[in-house]
Image: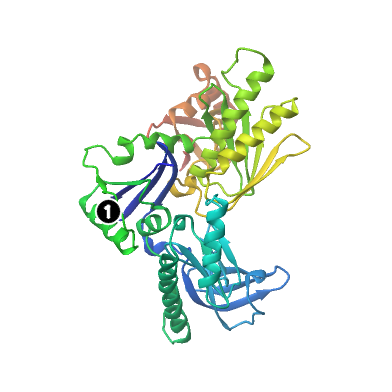
Amino acid sequence: MKRDIIISALLNQVQVGIVEDGRLVEYYLERDCKDRLESNIYKGKVENVLPGMGAAFVDIGTAKNAFLFLADAAADLKIGESIMVQVSKEAVGAKGPRVTTKISLPGRYLVLMPCQDHIGVSRQITDGDERLRLKEIAEEIRPEGCGLIVRTVAESCTRSELQEDLTELLEEWSCIKKKYKGKSSSPLLYQDFDLVHRILRDLYAAENTKVVVDSAELQNRVEEDLANLGVKEIAPVELYQGKVDLLTHLGFRKELERAGNNRVWLDCGGYLVFNQTEALMSIDVNTGKYVGSKNLQDTVLKTNLQAAQEIAHQLRLRNTGGIVIIDFIDMSDPNNREAVLEQLAMSLSADKTRTNLLGFTRLGLVELTRKKTERLLSHVLEVDCPHCKGRGRVLSDETLAFQIAKEVNSLSLENTETISVYCHPAVAGFVIGPRGSNLRALEKHTGRTICVHGDESLARQDYRVQSCSID
């Protein structure tokens, strides 16, 4: 598979797009690598142990204590004791970061797991003979009491290349242990590399990867990082010098905008509706404008097959994690249902993040899970709307006008002569009513003079009701 790595940097912001076969499949944004906690290793202090929740809270020097599942702890914990933990999930909202005692150190070809007796090979390596070869090498070189995972980029690597990578990881682990036993004032024992280095380390393969950057400084940085990673055959790093933003020039801004919409159109004319809740993502498939040419079942099947491909792509680009429920258009033919499941499974196989496709439920919905890794794309690029508070809906103009009328009525009970209302012109129109009928009725009801001012500078949901006291 041909892969392009697009890197753009401006001020303290770095953007990385992963392009496979000409389409944007992953997007990363890092504004300041110092703010990133995931994969960092800390010397923490146990602040609280809650057996009823199966959890403990650990102070790692961040604003909020980290959350540790007791199942992830190597031994029983006591309040006040020191413990080595690694951040497995960033803090989200009111929740602090999640940590684990199961440490893992990623290298170029291997992941070292101290104190874990496990050997694994990346599922992205599909050739059975190659998987067996790599597993045998990993068994031979792994230190006693440690586990190893062979990464995707290790495919076709020699024993000496894997051994060299392991040696560097063991040296890093030795430094971490020394810091943990020392008396440093900082709880941070290990900080993962920045976004550019991580992407090159994890995804670059010389034979099928092209890197495009938008500055000479980035070009030099990428070439140096690849050399330090031990990449033998480094393809030329392409420098883009156009006037238009690199991602816009390549057409990927539209892909990001599309991934930010609840409704995504399919090429056939059907469409998908995405709804993200705290617990799960639900996806509804509709035929939309597509009417087909043969019969209803053929139309439904073609829509669902195309939807399965697009859903797999959107889950990856949006970085959706957790439970996903898909409501495909009803199919009466079991063979058609099986074909759609096969298409979905095949499309999901390109995703390096682990997914588990559970199939159709008794209600005809498809269930799957996708491992939570980085933050949702929407959380990276967007914030909750200050007007709707993230709900996606706001009060109608008529409802706002009725609220204003209630406040005017309340103020009329005080010692006032004139009441002034300041609101958006569209809302003011409902307060005044056709030919002033609502305003006259309100003045008659309250016995007060009411002045309504339409103000374009006010947001639709904002208004002020003020009174003038009688001397």
Q: Give the camera-side residue of 327 and 413.
A: 327
Residue 46 lies, with reference to residue 151, above or below; the image says below
Circle 1: element type: loop
Q: Is residue 73 left or right of residue 152?
A: right
Q: Is residue 308 left or right of residue 215?
A: right
Q: Residue 3's x, y, as percent? A: 40, 44
Q: Is residue 341 left or right of residue 19?
A: right
Q: Quadrant of the N terminus?
A: top left
**Residue 236 in view:** yes
Residue positioned 59% across, 34% down in the render: 308
Q: Give the camera-side residue of 392 and 70.
A: 70
Q: Quadrant of the C terminus?
A: top left
How is the structure coloured here? rainbow
Q: Quadrant of residue 327?
A: top right
Residue positioned 45% across, 49% down in the render: 380
Residue at the extreme top of the image, as rendered: 293
Which residue is labeled 1 in the image? 11
**Residue 286 in view:** no
Residue positioned 60% across, 29% down in the render: 305
Residue at the extreme right of the image, as rendered: 362
Residue 68 lies, with reference to residue 358, above or below; the image says below
Q: Residue 39's x, y, as percent? A: 48, 65
Residue 289 lies, with reference to residue 50, above or below; the image says above
Q: Residue 64's x, y, as percent? A: 52, 68
Residue positioned 29% across, 49% down in the render: 235
Q: Give the camera-side residue of 232 and 337.
A: 232
Are there few (<14), some (14-19), or many (20+) residues within 10 Å of tag 1?
Answer: few
